[in-house]
Image (cartoon, rainbow, N blue to C red):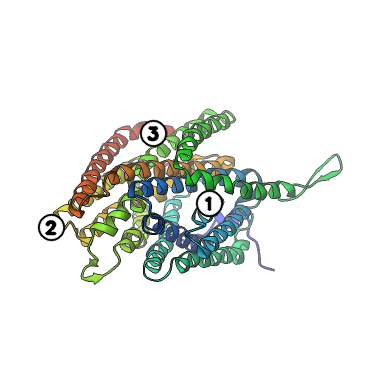
Amino acid sequence: MAHQPSLEEIQNFKGKYPKQLWSLFFSEMWERFCFYGMRGMLTYFMVTQLFMKDEDANLQYGATQAFVYAFTFIGGLFADKILGFRKSLFWGGILMILGSAILAYDPHQFFFLGISFTVVGTGFFKPNISTMVGTLYKGNDTRRDAGFSLFYSGINIGALLGGYACIAIGKQYSWHLAFGLAGIVMAISLLTFLFTQKSLGPIGLSPFKNDETKDGKIINRKWYDYAVYAGSLAVIPVIMIMVAKTQYTDWFMYTIGPATLIYLIYEMTKYGWAERKKLMAALVFIFFSILFWAFFEQSGGSLSLFAAKNLDNTVLGIKLDPNGVNNAANSLFVIIFAPIIGLIWLGLAKRKIEPNTVVKFGLAFLFLAGAFYVFYATRFFATVQGIASLDVFTVAYLVLTFGELCLSPIGLSIMTKLSPTKLQGVMMGMWFLASAYGQYVAGILGAGLSKGHTGDSLTQKLMTYTDGYKQLAIYALIAGVVLLIISPIVKKLMQEVK
């Protein structure tokens, strides 16, 4: 029987990374292949196969992605209180496989049913594997950011492979095969986790590890698990209706945010002033992450349609699918630069000159502004027919990647640093709920960029889209400057957390 290490043994690892990080890395990599493969197909599939208008497809994309990330809060909550991270992750993976299988069978007739299974499944899977990564480290371990950066590169290997392969297979061969491939790799993700979970020791186990005894009687807690499983299946038809009708998404988003904030305030009353200040700092990061993702997630909406209609098909002379490049370029750059950025943070930390997390967030917005200015600049490298350079478009993603690396892996890390142990799943869920609001706003922004384009020429579309990207660049620049100005205040709230 394999030795199951204690938490202390795991956290007292030697070297830069704990060995358990690698198994979580590969499990997350294949899950992200599934997720980003599906994500990269959504808008294009809705426009070309379900014959939606560009504006409606953008709104639908925003609604679908909003529910995906909003459900991570619920998944994190049930993992904290009932299932534990491991059971939650496994159940989410099963639901994602079922969703992919439904879409592979008939993506036209059962599109919203398959997507709804994926929404709920991702909610149970995504926040909990990230939380387990944070648990591999002690609270004051300076190697944590580097670990999350490496983990983030694993996410992006999956996103690179899935983002390019699924859309290319769907466009050139079969949409059934494309959706089926997403399910196959999700099964690989679950098997990877299943065969390596013993190395995690006590990490991720249910809070009800054993039946409790009260007054000499054994209280069976298993029915709590079954209730969560049954409830998550029962909610799928509701999710399907709400995803299909975007006005329901509006109502949901107007409700879930305030309700979540009220719940967090209630939880904060159970802690002292020091913990509350840290949670307030976490809320600042969450708010600005909403703005970041609202711009960044144009990649799955307006930039997807822009790539399909207004870009040529060569990068450095190599013929490539522009939608595949749109889905995969960012991931390729993350794979290359995430470990390097992680090592840079380590080197700066050793010299005691590493910028604090607020400054990193500010830098993320400055890079974001630069990226959207380059998207705007594609108009200067376009033909008279309105076909712009895929090379310049790819450079914009390079700049965008540096912004993402200053925010997203650091964001995952800071949520685990600022959260009390019993609230880590909830706070990780809130981090992804902020992404849900970002996705929701991204859909609205993308719909605004697509409005009235039905009869426009390609040149007119090019001008309208790039004008919009210029405006986003300006807003991102303002947000970055504001973050840098308020960084001393937020740093005080964070106290000893760097």
Asked whether the residues under the numbered discs 2 and 1 touch, taking CB atoms below 8 Å apart as contact, a structural biologist would say: no
Q: What percent of the width, then of the height, locates residue 70?
A: 50, 43
Q: What percent of the width, then of the height, locates residue 457?
A: 20, 53
Q: Is residue 424 visible?
A: yes
The CA distance from mark 3 to mark 2 is 49 Å
Answer few, some or many: residues within 10 Å of disc 1's Cα (few below 14, many 20 plus, some between 14 and 19): many
What residue does disc 2 label? 384
The answer to which quarter of the image holds residue 285 is: top left
Left or right of 165, for residue 367: left
Left or right of 403, for residue 175: right
Q: What percent of the width, then of the height, locates residue 331?
A: 36, 60
* Residue shown at the point (36%, 58%) measured from the top left: 48
The CA distance from mark 1 to mark 3 is 38 Å
What residue does disc 3 label? 490
Three-letter code for the amino acid on which mark 3 is drawn: Val
User: Does residue 92 lie above or below 427 as drawn?
Assistant: below
- Secondary structure of the residue carrying tag 1 is helix
